[in-house]
Amino acid sequence: EPEVTQTPSHQVTQMGQEVILRCVPISNHLYFYWYRQILGQKVEFLVSFYNNEISEKSEIFDDQFSVERPDGSNFTLKIRSTKLEDSAMYFCASRGGAKNIQYFGAGTRLSVL
Amino acid sequence: AQTVTQSQPEMSVQEAETVTLSCTYDTSENNYYLFWYKQPPSRQMILVIRQEAYKQQNATENRFSVNFQKAAKSFSLKISDSQLGDTAMYFCAFINFGNEKLTFGTGTRLTIIP
C-alpha cells in the first residue's frame, strides 16, 4: 500500500541553524501538508500546498518557515533559523482529489538544542 | 472558529470489551468531514474512520464504528472486541468542505489491558 515517507526520523540541531525536513508524498496525490505536534499537545496545521503554491497557512507558519516541491516527488519544509520552541514532531500529509482524506507520514522528530 | 473537543484524556478497558471515545465539534458550516485517527507508540498517524456530514448513515470499518449526531455536533468512536493493538492515542479531527486545514482534538489515550 502506498504511503507517505518522511526523512529523517529524528533531527537534532542547534538553535539558530537551518533545517530541512523531507517528505515523499503518495505518488498520485496533488495536495500536500505539514503539521506539527509539540510533545503532549494536539496536532496543529502549518501549511497546505497545491499546484506549486501555498493554498493555506496558519499563524504559526511565519517568515521562518517555507515549503517547496523541488521535483516531482519531494515536498520539503525549511525552518530558516530554528528556535527552542520549534522542537516538535513534524508530520507531512498528502491527499488525492476525491475523498478529502489526508494520509500522514510517520513524522520527523525535531530537537532544537 | 472551528474547535474539536475530546473530554476523555485517558481510558482503559479490558481486551475484548467495547469502548466508546467521545468527540464534539463546533462549526457554522453545513458540509464537512469528520475523522478518527489513531497514533500508536510508533507515532504514525493512521486513519481509522471517516464520516461525511451529509450522510446520515454512521460509518463503519470492521470493529470500528461511529455515532454521528449532526444536530448535537457529536462524533463518537466505538471500538468493539478491543485488541491489544488498539492501544494508542486517538484523535478526532474535522475539516470543512473546500478547506485544507484539519483541526484536531487533544486526543484520548486508550490502553487495552490484557
Image (tube, coloured by chain):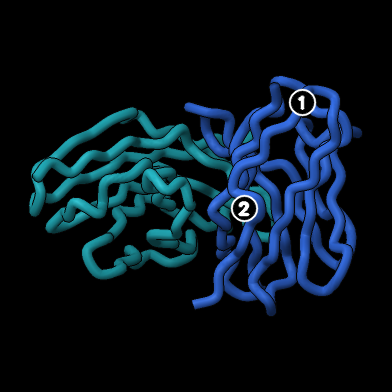
Chain colours: A blue, B cyan
Tell me: B80 left or right of A58.
left
Rendered location of residue B99, percent (x, y): 70, 55
Q: Residues within 10 Å of mark 1 (few under 14, many from 20)?
A: some
Please report the residue visible at 46 percent of the width from the left and 46 percent of the height from the top. B43
The residue type indicated by label 2 comes to Asn
Kindly identify which chain the residue marked by label 2 belongs to.
Answer: B
Dividing the picture into quarters, in which one does residue A102 lie? bottom right
Quadrant in the picture for the C terminus of chain B: top left
> Of helix, strand and loop, which one carries label 1?
loop
Identify whether A54 is placed above or below A42.
below
Rendered location of residue B14, percent (x, y): 9, 43
Question: What mark, if any, has residue A14 been given in the picture?
Answer: 1
Q: B92 or A66, which lies in front?
A: A66
The residue type indicated by label 1 comes to Gln
Kindly identify which chain the residue marked by label 1 belongs to.
Answer: A
> Of helix, strand and loop, which one carries label 2?
strand
Q: A59 or A10, which lies in front?
A: A10
Please report the residue visible at 44 percent of the width from the left and 45 percent of the height from the top. B92
Tell me: B69 left or right of A18.
left
- Residue topped by disc 2: B96
Identify whether A81 is placed above or below B49.
above
Dividing the picture into quarters, in which one does residue A59 lie? top right
